[in-house]
Amino acid sequence: MRRNSWLAWTTAVVALAGAASTAHAMDYLNIIDPANPTFTQALGINGSDTIVGYGNAITFDGFVLALPPVPSNFTRENFPGATGGTQVVGIDAAGDTVGFYVNPDGSNHGFFKPSGGAFTTVDQPGSVFDQLLGINQAGNEIAGYSSFTDPTGATGQQAFSLIRSTSTYTNINALLPANFNSQATGVNNAGTVVGFYIYDTTGDSSAFVDAAGVITSFQYPGSTNTMALGINDIGEIVGDYTLANGNMFGFLDNRGIFSSLDPFGSTMVTANGINDNGRIVGFYTNAIGNTIGFVTPAPEPASLALLGTGLIGLAVTRRRRRSM
């Protein structure tokens, strides 16, 4: 299985090697956590261009970043007493954040933190493993996944969405085609949720969109694995895909048109979040094996559909989708 959980992604994904088409370096801005200069992942961005993520592949070191990415603009955000660390994965318009933390016993728990406020643990009742992976800009709906059977989170993953005001969970996994694991990774203000599910024993994955309970599965054309990881209020989706040769790239799905993302000719790319201005955050592995975060510039309105500033690494193509 290529990725079993968000925790597994962050350690295993950097081992994937791949070649990518070239893209103009000026179109991407590196994000390097000054406390963890060899490992930074940028995971979420809101409409004010505030970015969240974490550094350190072993003991996660969460942060909130107000651009530009200079050391003084990084603010640490770590759940108290979480010796395994904290990943800050999503941020809403008000600056509230979500993510997960790892306790001394290795258990994973979701969290919600209001801007300027205290952390609150958010675990689905009856679960033994939880991660929150996205929050919409209104701050009223969260995407994530739980396992009710496996404290390590490697099996039994079930994608869900959560309405904060009523603590109402929707079991998205129950709506998906038959699968081994599923994760909900992003949600927008319309309540449209994106994510992915593992559908065979070799670990092949398919991205999905859940629009009011109607599931649409899709693959990046020509890929063996596709994971949707973020969505904005315009309906643009970002994520990553893998080819049969193991090469891995980020993607943007702009209203049915796919574009491949590849910062600096890197060997591995994940696009993890996108805001309503079209700015994308993610991370890549450089030539010496360091993991570096990135953020793109906001596209000019006239070139939004094609990200015409040179961001595109591969030719655009019409999405292939199948409804379930």
Image (cartoon, helix red, strand yellow):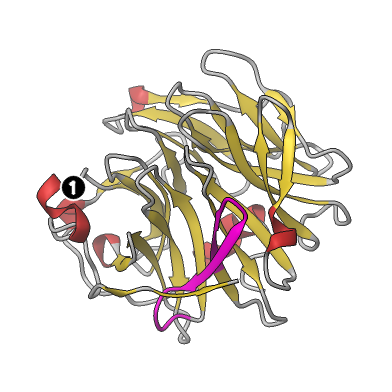
Residue 99 falls within the magenta-colored stretch: no
For this orientation, the residue located farthest to the bottom is: 244
Is 219 within the magenta?
Answer: yes
Spot occupied by residue 32 in the image (x, y as percentages of width and height): 37, 42
Residue 306: image location, x then y, percent: 19, 61
Kindly identify the amino acid type of the residue bearing the numbered disc 1: Pro
Q: Quadrant of residue 205?
A: bottom right
Point 32% across, 28% down: residue: 48
Magenta segment's dominant SS is strand
Callout 1: SS = loop
Quarter of the image where one finds residue 298: top left
* Residue ID at (46%, 47%): 41
Q: Residue 20: give x, y in percent of width and height.
A: 31, 74
Residue 312 seen:
yes
Q: Which residue is mark 1?
A: 299
User: Relative to 244, is 74 above or below?
Assistant: above
The residue range painted magenta reads: 207-223
